[in-house]
Amino acid sequence: MKRMITYTYKYFKNEMPDWKRRKDPILSRVFYRRISFATAAVCANIGISANTVSYVSALVAIIADALFLVNSHITIIIAAILVNIWLIMDCTDGNLARSVKKQPFGEFADGISSYILVGFMCTCMGFSVYQTGGVLFEKGCAWIILIGALASSSDTMMRLIYQKYKATEAEMVKEGKIEEELDKRLSHDNVRSFRVRVEAELGVGGILPIFILLASIFNALDLVVLYCLLYFGFSCVVMSLSYVRKAIKHVNEYEVGRKEKANES
């Protein structure tokens, strides 16, 4: 009879790959990830899969976003706490996928959770500030809703542009028109890149959840909304220009290659 494994905190800690340990933002490494080792052990021992954790975390994201819409200080703090719980769950499903069992559509399940959270969160926080006021914006100022919507849209647009580029690239590679290019952002060897580190530390996997919690407690969510617009907006512009440049480069290389073949014939 096959002996059943009893999963422990230590098991997941020891199974954590070095590249992932280095890639984790500092706050996640010292707090969220450590808690996730324990939650992953509980899930693994009772048979909860990585995909299940991802889908439940998507539900947590929806509830958190919805609670920001309620005009109550306590409810807003609960929403901020759920954002932090979401990050723990995001670490948990990764632990399970790497160290227990990786399931089909795991990346999809993990992806929609973060898409849902950030896709609505900034707009909902902006509406929260509209109802209660903040540090820089008075109660009833509709501009903060627009700022939140732009922040959320920037993150969503950034993801869509990336996915569209990768889908188009895959089609072009399949047709033999271009050679596939390694995505350095996903490379394990790129974890120490300054750009990758900054993105990790400043985003939803880094300081943002704790920033949201503190801002909720001290009625300063407008600062978070402005921060999100700067962070997601800047990232969207930089990434969009980067992939436009890559697309133009591929087109030029393709045209040069086509002309060379025509001349040879």
Image (cartoon, rainbow, N blue to C red):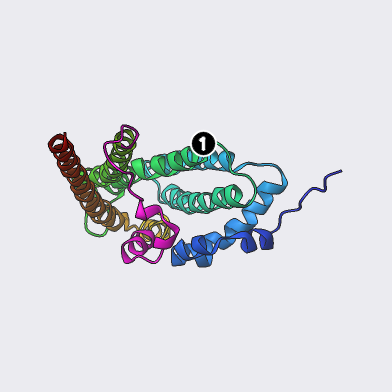
Q: Residue 91's spot in the image, x, y percent?
A: 53, 53
Question: Residue 129 versus residue 2: which sits nearer the camera?
Answer: 2
Mark 1 packing: few (<14 Cα in 10 Å), some, or many (20+)?
Answer: few
At a point 34% along the width and 41% down the height, the residue shown is 119
Part of the protein shown in magenta: 173-202
Res 18 visible: yes
Residue drawn where x is 42% and y is 62% of the image: 189
Which quarter of the figure has residue 64?
A: top left
Q: Which residue is mark 1?
A: 105
Where in the figure is residue 194, as x and y percent of width and height? 32, 66
| Front-lying residue, 21 or 47 | 21
How many marks overall? 1
Q: Quadrant of the N terminus?
A: top right
- Whether residue 192 is in magenta: the answer is yes
Residue 142 as seen in the image, left or right of residue 72: left
Which residue is at a point 35% across and 65% down the rendered structure image?
193
> Which residue is depicted at the point 22% across and 54% down?
234
